[in-house]
Amino acid sequence: MKRFILSAFAMFAFVSAFAATIPAKSNITAVTVYADRAVVTRTASVDLTTGTHEVVFEGLPATLGDNSLQVAGRGTASATILDLAARQIFVPLTPNDRVRSLEEDLKTVQRQIRVLDDRAAIVNDQKNFVARMLAAATTAPAPAPNGTTPARPSLDEWRQLQGYSEEATTKWAKEIQDIDRQKEDHVAAQTAIQRQLNELRGAGNRAQKTVTVRVDAASAGNLQLALSYTVPNASWVPAYDARLRTAARTVELSYFGVVRQNTGEDWNNVALTLSTARPSLGGAAPEYAPWIVDVNRPVAMAAKANAAPGAVYSTINRGFSDALGAADLQEATFAQASVEQGATSATFKITAPATIPANNTTQKVAINGNGLAALLEYNSTPKLREAAFLTAKATNTTEFPLLAGTLNTFLDDTFVATGSLKSVMPGEKFDLALGADDGIAIKRRVVNRFTENTGLTNGKRLITYEYVVTVTNNKKTAEKITVREPVPQSRNEQIAVKMITPADRDIGTPEVKKEIIREANGGLAWEFNLQPGGKREITLKFSIEHPADLAVSGLE
């Protein structure tokens, strides 16, 4: 068994007059998806005789990057890969079955819309006819040639005519409304079908590429070739499901990759890899141009990005992997992707073969699922909302970096929120916001707001505020709770704010921990543990004093 790799793209130096052409019957076997592109690996098996051969891969996407081409080979033949070249060709566009089916659906919908338009026109003609009939009945008749005046409709005839008009107009109005509703549905269907057709026709562009690999065989035998290339219009983004198990105090975090592609090739049962590398940034830091200030001659700043050769194409040999078997299922758990942590990125090799059509639809694949120990805390700002919001503090104990992505949050079996997760590296701590929990009851009430004038000569006004917040733990477990209350901050020396309850001596700082902490924004935070069925009352009392003739903003 021998194996040969040609790691750089090369144009043909010459073509042997005796080279035999072999069409390669290839299949896509492996794909590595990045944030803005994909590396596709095709494999083919060819039988070689002694001599030079040209193995031709046909029908490849016109958008593939010529400079990204790589080829590897192994087999029983003693062979040397000489070079490879790509060229663009144009082929007649042959609609596939899906396109033909959509075209028929589009014609059907268009016929239905035309039938509705015709019916609406008939109804409008009937309405106009009745309107003309009523106008004629209410217009004084012209004298006949013999001088006689035609008889006008009697009162009963007029009532019958009016009743018929009202009945017919009501019926036609309902019919027009029904026609409008049906037409809206058909127009929406027509738009959707046309959009799908546009995507499929765009994917079936007449332009294609053909790649020719030139091989010299010293001895006859079989050779397996793996051809890889980059294509645009492919991407993946992270997504997460976080489920808090309150009894176990754990967070079940499921890590997914949401993949979509419109490369022009369907990926059927491929070995899928997701990479966090960003080849579009280049391999080195950009170099800035001189910043020149001149008179009315602006110079645009430019950045030069160096390509990262070889960084994107390390997965070509996955095309030789044997078919992956399905994992044994015991419970409804998620498959675990294997992770390879590099110096600057990570790759996730999805365990099961994946099928992703080239229609830009999303495919959600499982990367990882883990149970993480969680420290639960409740936070409340009663002045803004009388509710306690649960937060789970966890640590990423996996070897996976958790990249920024969307997050669906569940409290046991109840869906509670949709949000986002910031990037979390292995070993890093992070918070999960789990929404409001009615098991912790919060009530806030104004006890007192008293205004009095002080000072006999200087005319001062003193306003005293007093609030009480009641926290009740209706859960069966002790919980840690933080209650935050804003406290006025004076920005003028004529306005004095004085704390009454709690006293200044009872208030700590982040450096000097106490039960009550003065926060960076000037407010207060009470941190305490509350036993099951326990109740805690928090009193906040302060005064604001200012000159009576001074207009003060921010007062309640």
Image (tube, grey):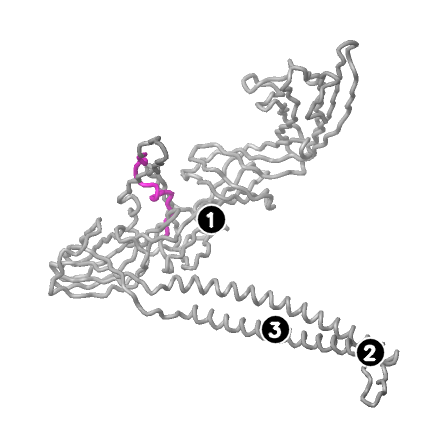
Position of residue 157 relative to residue 41, above or below, is below
The disc labelled 3 sits on which kind of residue? Leu
The answer to whether 425 appears left or right of 58 in the picture is right
Q: Which residue is mark 3?
A: 116
The N terminus appears in which quarter of the rendering?
bottom left
Q: What secondary structure is found at the residue carrying circle 1?
A: loop
Q: Which mark is residue 334?
A: 1
Q: Which residue is mark 2?
A: 140
Residue contact at pointers 1 and 2, CB within 8 angstroms: no
Position of residue 48 relative to residue 292, above or below, is below
The answer to whether 324 appears left or right of 108 in the picture is left
- Mark 1 against mark 2, which lies toward the viewer? 2
The disc labelled 2 sits on which kind of residue? Ala
Q: CA distance from mark 1 to mark 2?
A: 85 Å
Residue 496 is situated, as x and y percent measured from the top left of the image, at 68, 16
* Disc 1 residue crowd, few under 14, some 14–19, many 20+, Cα 10 Å: some
Residue found 83% across the figure and 90% down from its top: 146
Which residue is outermost to the right? 155
Q: What secondary structure is found at the residue carrying circle 3?
A: helix
Which residue is outermost to the bottom? 146
The C terminus appears in which quarter of the rendering?
top right
- Mark 3 against mark 2, which lies toward the viewer? 2
Residue found 36% across the figure and 63% down from its top: 205
Q: What secondary structure is found at the residue carrying circle 2?
A: loop
Provide the residue span drawn in magenta.
272-288
Q: Which of the marked residues, 3 or 1, is nearer the chain's N terminus? A: 3
